[in-house]
Amino acid sequence: MAGLAVNVDHVATLREARKTTYPDPVAAAALVELAGADGVVIHLREDRRHIKDRDVRIIRQTVQTRLILEMAATNEMVAIALEIRPDLVTLVPEKREELTTEGGLDLVTHRDHIEDAISSLHQGGIPVSLFLDPDRDQIKIAHKINADKVEIHTGTFCDAKSPQQREETFQQIVDSAKMASKLKMGANAGHGLDYKTIKAFKGVSGIEEFSIGHSIIARALMVGIDRAVREMIALIKEL
């Protein structure tokens, strides 16, 4: 069965809307673990718009499962990761004006830069995943520059406007997962997945873990974090 890593960024987003000390993503991280999540995901952005350095440090000290740190491949972030030592770093593209991560890394254009970041993190004993669009050529480059895993971007599939687009983009995800498996890399998947779109992955092999945040945190506002996480785990178990 694939695992579930829960992104708690949006708990911090709500906190920052009023510049208060609550709700606390540290507490949310503990609650998603108690509900059965296999890992906690946080994205420390350059502008610190939601998750703060304080959150990263405390969650690193308190997490009982695995801490997955999403970050841009900058010197600042690599230095923080080497100090904090998360269980996995996921390198993602980052633009200040975006609401959330839009699309995967471009390894054709930024290959050398990403490869340098991977090398530095590996020297510190930290495995690295790359957030990529479902593109077999990008997967091949990820393998060549020694990425340990890829996280396949599912957002285009989740936002598809027509059945044809949904079918085409889903097949690209399936093909990318197969390619990663063939190259002996782990394959995770995430972005935009919710309680409906996750059902499409029934019978799909090769995906080790789903990274889901917004839909779980949104549902948690209505039913509580424990139930929201357990309901998603139940759906994943049916895959």
Image (spheres, grey):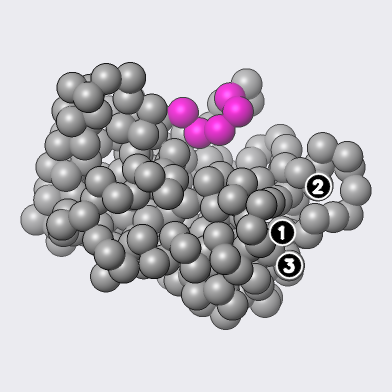
Q: CA distance from mark 2 to mark 1?
A: 9 Å
Q: Which mark is residue 25?
A: 1
Question: Distance between the Cα atoms at labels 3 and 2?
Answer: 12 Å
State the image quarter where residue 110 is shown.
top left
Residue assigned mark 3: 27
Task: Please state if 204 lies on the left or on the right of 142 as rendered.
Answer: left
Taking the spot 61% from the left edge, 46% from the top edge, the residue there is 218
Picture coordinates of residue 58, whole percent (x, y)? 73, 69
The alpha-carbon separation of the residues under discs 1 and 3 comes to: 5 Å
Q: Position of residue 77 (x, y in %)?
A: 59, 48
Lower position in the chain sequence, tag 3 or tag 2: 2
CB-based contact (under 8 Å), mark 2 and mark 1: yes
Please tell me whether mark 2 sits on a helix, a strand or a loop. Answer: helix
Residue nearest the viewer, comparing 190 with 85: 190
Instruction: Report the span colored magenta.
Output: 98-102
Would you say the magenta stretch is mainly helix, strand or loop?
loop
Please give the name of the residue rendered at 56% of the width and 33% of the height, measured from the top-left corner. Answer: 100
For the N terminus, the image quarter is: bottom left
Q: Position of residue 46 (x, y in %)?
A: 66, 38
Is residue 40 visible in the rendered image? The answer is no
Dot 2 amino acid type: Arg
| Residue picked out by circle 2 | 15
Badge 1 marks a residue whose secondary structure is: helix
10 Å crowding of disc 1: few (<14), some (14-19), many (20+)? many
Q: Is residue 49 above or below residue 151?
A: above
Q: Looking at the image, which residue sits at the far left?
A: 182
Kind of residue at badge 3: Ala
Which corner quadrant holds the C terminus? bottom left
| Residue 172 in the figure: left or right of residue 187 | left
Q: Is residue 239 visible?
A: yes
Q: Is residue 228 left or right of residue 12?
A: left
